[in-house]
Image (cartoon, rainbow, N blue to C red):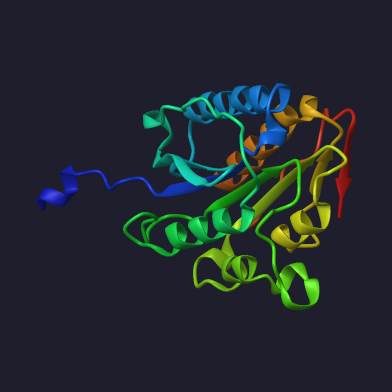
Amino acid sequence: MNLNDFVSKEQRALPIFILADTSGSMSGEKINELNLALREMQNSLKNVDDIRGKFQLCVIGFGGGVSVIQALADIENVVLSELSANGNTPMGEAFINAYEMIEDKSIVSSRSYTPTIVLISDGQPTDFYSNGGKHLDWEPLKKLHTGARSAKCQRLAMGIGADADIEMLKAFVNNPEVPVIKAKDASGISAFFRWVTMSTISRMNSVNPNASIVAPIFNMDDMEVIV
């Protein structure tokens, strides 16, 4: 009998990349709610039974600069640091960072399922520049949409408050079948992340976890669904 018969194969991972706006405008209630929502999502994903693989999580913050707050790791090994809010909104730099990580097979294994990228922001990117002003022509966004691996990712997005750049979030998602969620204030953040969690679990439990699947939208008071 072959030794491999005694060695269970490593579970396939479904990576989740959180692109979190940590600029100064997120200070106070919004950043506190975001920290709570991320911990709630981690706990929910850790306790899912009977799934096709395992979840991985990476958190990239963009506020005054871009930093990988949590490197991609199996969900049970993630130790979430408290996000703090300050500085401007270098969203484009965060897109490039996520793109480079997803395209790197030493970070995202070739055995992994297609990643999910989640964007949450309450403002406009301060590093936006595009000839003609079209969001989809913006180089950081073009990279995400045309990368060999990143182009296939499921993308989910939420804008908070009246200053959120909804057109940018729609360009990020770039899928008419996936809505952008808009919340009036910080109270919608936890509900959004519960929707992200359920959508991710639905993907993992589906016949094809690589497919883009979103859960039904529920319990989203004071929120708007934009398609």
**Quadrant location of residue 133?**
bottom right
Viewer can see residue 116? yes
Quadrant in which the C terminus appears: bottom right
Residue 165 x %, y %: 80, 51
Number of numbered discs overlaid on the protein picture: 0
Specify whether 83 is left or right of 109. Answer: right
- Residue at 70% across / 22% down in the picture? 28
Residue 185 x %, y %: 82, 29
Viewer can see residue 210? no
Residue 168 x %, y %: 76, 58
- Residue at 53% across / 47% down in the picture? 65
In the rendered image of this protein, does residue 34 appear above or below residue 174? Answer: above
Foreground: 92 or 146? 92
Residue 177 x %, y %: 79, 58
- Residue at 60% across / 66% down in the picture? 140
Foreground: 121 or 181? 121
Specify whether 60 is left or right of 215. Answer: left
Residue at far bottom of view: 131
**Quadrant location of residue 155?**
bottom right
- Residue at 48% across / 34% down in the picture? 50
Foreground: 123 or 218? 123
Specify whether 126 is left or right of 65. Answer: right
